[in-house]
Image (tube, rainbow, N blue to C red):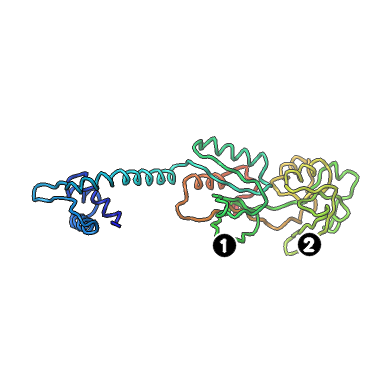
Amino acid sequence: MADLNDIVVFVKVAQLESFSRAARALGMPVSTVSRRIAELEGALGVVLLQRTTRSLTLTSQGRDYFNQCSEPLNLLVDAERVLTQTQRMPEGLLRVSVPVTLGQDIFLEFISDFLNNHPRIKIDLFITNIFLDLIVENIDVSIRFGDLKDSALVAQKLGSQIRYIVASKDYLQGRGLPVEPDDLVSHSCVLLNAKNNEGEWELISGQKRKTISVLGPIASRDFQSVSSFVYRGHGVGFLPSSYCEAKIETGELVRLLPEWTSKQVDIHAVYPTRKFRPARLQLFLEALKSWKDAPWTSPTAELGA
């Protein structure tokens, strides 16, 4: 089979009816153009061009070959142009996976704003706590909380999150405040991902660490519902700071054992590869990093900037 690069050179020479003009258009020496035409003719076993000192014309076989080759080449060029523009322009489908904890109004509003700002981009959103295989499921980007296990993925840190022990004033009315982590055993707790409404809270205070077994009247699978039951006075909660800081400031929630928190949980955007990252993914990553209402502390804020 003839070399496609040689065919490209031939078509350009035929179109411009000149070796020198074709060489300039292709950005290569005239000698290279001449050699490629000779190699193409050798591979095909036909003469494609009649050359004289003053003119260059297609042979009948050359004309037939040009007519057959030029249109497919134009289609290839168009396909490459479309693909290149898709990479450069913010358009197309973006498949995004996030944990259930982000399936709430604040994140949905972020997605809505992103779509409004970039109307040529479409989003297919997966809200699940299952760690989907990004390559198998054809996911462009996933937001993940906690330690990353798949070293094949590219990760960009978005920030971190920490959890506080809190309760509503209504719940605390008539109850003693916990003084030590072990005091939480005697309190009703609102739990996340608990089995038989029993759970364990890992607490940190400087170099001290405690694991406390807690019980409660209700458990759920996402922080939005857990926080809602804490707000309504059903028990003590262990909530991300973004779910409780504003209510602590207004006095609606009381922070208990303020010297104790959870360990820091890092949040990353992960995606399969760095190569040929399309503009729509780049824009989405930039929007996540600049999201002012994000339910995590940005890396710059962590550094005290």
Circle 1 residue: 151
Q: Could you say which disc has been placed on residue 45 in the image?
A: none
- Count of numbered labels shown in the rendering: 2
User: Within 10 angstroms of label 2, few (less than 14), some, or many (20 or more) residues?
Assistant: some
**274 sits left or right of 186 in the view:** left
Look at label 1 and name its amino acid. Answer: Ser
Is 128 positioned to the left or the right of 170 in the image?
left
In-front residue for pair 41/226: 41
C-alpha distance separating marks 1 and 2: 30 Å
Instruction: Residue 223: give x, y in percent of width and height.
Output: 73, 47
**Rendering coords of residue 11 (x, y %):** 24, 48
Q: Vertical placement of 242 versus 195: above or below?
A: above
> Which quadrant holds the N terminus?
bottom left
Q: Tell me residue 136's x, y (percent).
A: 56, 54
Marks 1/2 in contact by CB < 8 Å: the verdict is: no
Amino acid carrying mark 2 in the image: Lys
Give the residue pinned by disc 2.
210
Residue at position x 75%, y 39% in the image = 250
Residue 92 vertical position relative to residue 209 in the rendered view, above or below: above
Taking the spot 47% from the left edge, 48% from the top edge, the residue there is 278
- Residue 174: x %, y % from top left: 91, 45
Q: Which residue is painted at 81% across and 40% down in the image?
A: 232
Q: Residue furthest left?
A: 53
